[in-house]
Amino acid sequence: MKVGILGGGQLGRMLLQAAANYTVETYVLENDQYCPSAHLCHHFTKGDITDYDTVYNFGKQLDAITLEIESVNVDALDQLEKEGVKIFPTPAAIRIIKNKIVQKQFYKDFGIPSARFKITNNKNEVASHQDLFPAVHKIGEGGYDGKGVQIINSLEDLDKAFDAPSVLEQKVDIQKEIALIVAMDSKGATAIYPVSEMMINPSLNLLDYQISPALIPEKVLWVVEAIAIKLVKALNSPGLFAVELFIDKNNEVWVNETAPRVHNSGHHTIEANHSSQFDMLWRIMLGYPLGNTTPILPAAIINIIGEDNFSGDAVYEGLEEVLKIDNAFVHLYGKKQTKPGRKMGHVTILHNSYQDLTHKANKVKQLLKVKA
Amino acid sequence: MKVGILGGGQLGRMLLQAAANYTVETYVLENDQYCPSAHLCHHFTKGDITDYDTVYNFGKQLDAITLEIESVNVDALDQLEKEGVKIFPTPAAIRIIKNKIVQKQFYKDFGIPSARFKITNNKNEVASHQDLFPAVHKIGEGGYDGKGVQIINSLEDLDKAFDAPSVLEQKVDIQKEIALIVAMDSKGATAIYPVSEMMINPSLNLLDYQISPALIPEKVLWVVEAIAIKLVKALNSPGLFAVELFIDKNNEVWVNETAPRVHNSGHHTIEANHSSQFDMLWRIMLGYPLGNTTPILPAAIINIIGEDNFSGDAVYEGLEEVLKIDNAFVHLYGKKQTKPGRKMGHVTILHNSYQDLTHKANKVKQLLKVKA
């Protein structure tokens, strides 16, 4: 079976590591020929994943396609789907998720709890919805990793608002920020991974570290899982989905957003669950039974982020010290160049004590630095 | 760091899957450009690993080299080592292991228990050592996967004996056949994996299935571990070693042979141990601390072998049924062509009950067939 991946970053890299357990022939489309995935596939094509002809020509030779980033040319995927190429997830599901306005409307239409919102086309329209303040302003298309999101607490923040089609949503009074990976196969069978709890670094708006399974009351967990399953069933597409949610201070659960692909919040599944999110997506695409999502041990993920004030050839400080930690697993993405805030890798730690996990996660953050 | 692998089979493939966790730049030398490793490295070189110039030219651009098969040109590795390339294991250790005569003499010299033996140069010399019968005749160089080994029970078997420099050793009255992986880093620190117990298919003389950790008395285990550590320390080389041993019917322990590399008997470590044998070898080569060899759950390995009477494009029967088994992990090596007895992949099963493991291993053997 010939399967293509749109995008060649770290998600593609880890997908390709898992692919080599099966007989799949792998193809990658990506503009950067030195990307983390380029050397791990059977066939690398240099090209723009947002261009119709490039995606169509790449895809027409394949049996199936998946993606590692939403900003792809969905029109080309529509056409390929008509011609019999299987797309994971379907172009229809990608369209819903790709545009944050459509995504929010989808939650509303299907009764999936999500913060109250208005669609805005410019800054002036933001000013007319002060009833939603303090609010989060999210650009409709093109946001990624904290870019394309602004906090609008009052009219004083109005200059930060987007002058483009966007969603303005009431800020949730967050108690916990969580995520979970849901897999759905082509027959509609689902599997869910344990919930992860995220700690966010406010200055970069990037994940600081993450613990899984999250420590949340069982009744809240049931709600979270029911919402996530409902959401994926409503998307009505085989594939792997990362659902990000908030638990507010009243223990109410709200969907924040969904990614139609393998996701940073599931990286620990490589070591912490019997079947990783990457293995799971291959099982779905190859038509195999779903894998086992049981956790082996509680896990923490620490992202390895390019240090401030360093740009250029990446140098990793503290790697040896980190690898001395029992059950610390390092994943470096093979990016030659670092820059401030760039995701360069991650470390997963396994331990049966949560206190120990937190302690070790902080130790890794202190030890491991990417400089140039 | 630039690291080369001599040979591009399934061992190389699994090494390369693990390599992508680190920033290593990978090179593979192998005659078959469609081999299981070819598409997973940064740089593939088509060439003969037994040829001096080919190995030397491949290696002189590299920081380190390892191998996935012993039949390499060791003279070239000697020269490369002199020029500063690090070889894992050292050419001296490879020389000892590569020739079964030298290997047996090494055990004798270092007081490592191994069956009584004589060196033979032809069939007539075999006839003059009837005191060793029933015996095993092993050709000095070129044996692999059961080839190059003959059982000589009596003079009637003499026509099976090798007319080449070989070792004739007394047959051990085997109670159990076991193996364990030992890792040694460049500072001499060692780590050992739990012992595996092998079940051999007598007709192919290939591994049938394997259980780990082996069910052996603790006192015997201590002896096994002590012998394995002594052996690797005597080889005096960093690297990863698979030590195969017999436990005889008196619970005495005898070394059968050693492989200077990652090994079939350690494949379950991918899912069954926190740090796999493949991860461990990268840690050693990259100068990182040794990994954690603690078992997660007991494991069984079932090799997927080409069925008798089928040669040609491989077709896998029963794959879906096998993947339905909880914690059954399939590894297909991506070999296009099958032939009788060819290793096409393996399945690892994890379960906390040994009875269940054995039951599932048999089920996998019945379900999964490679035909053409």
Image: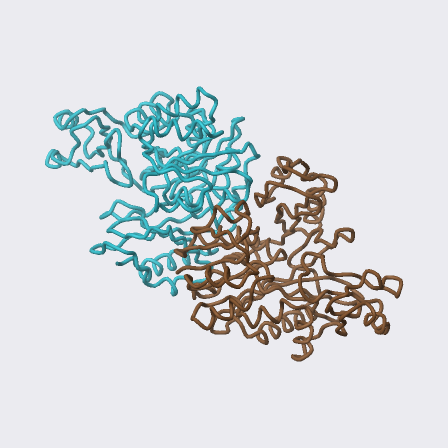
Chain colours: A brown, B cyan
Q: Nearer the viewer, residue A47 or A235?
A: A47
- Answer whether residue B324 is visible to the viewer in this image: no
Q: Nearer the viewer, residue A220 or B212?
A: A220
| Residue B328 horizontal side relative to residue A369, left or right | left
**Residue B229 % position (x, y):** 45, 30
Question: Residue placed at 57% from the left, 55% from the top?
Answer: A269
Q: Is residue B75 shown above or below A138?
A: above
| Residue B265 horizontal side relative to residue A100, left or right | left
Q: Is residue A1 shown above or below B1?
A: below
- Toward the front, the furthest residue is A53
Location of the C terminus of chain B by quadrant is: bottom left
**Residue A44 % position (x, y):** 47, 51
| Residue A246 horizontal side relative to residue B252, left or right | right
- Answer whether residue B180 is visible to the viewer in this image: yes
Q: How many marks?
A: 0
**Residue B5 % position (x, y):** 42, 36
Q: Nearer the viewer, residue A360 or B171?
A: A360
**Residue B11 % position (x, y):** 40, 42
- Quadrant in which residue A318 is drawn: top right
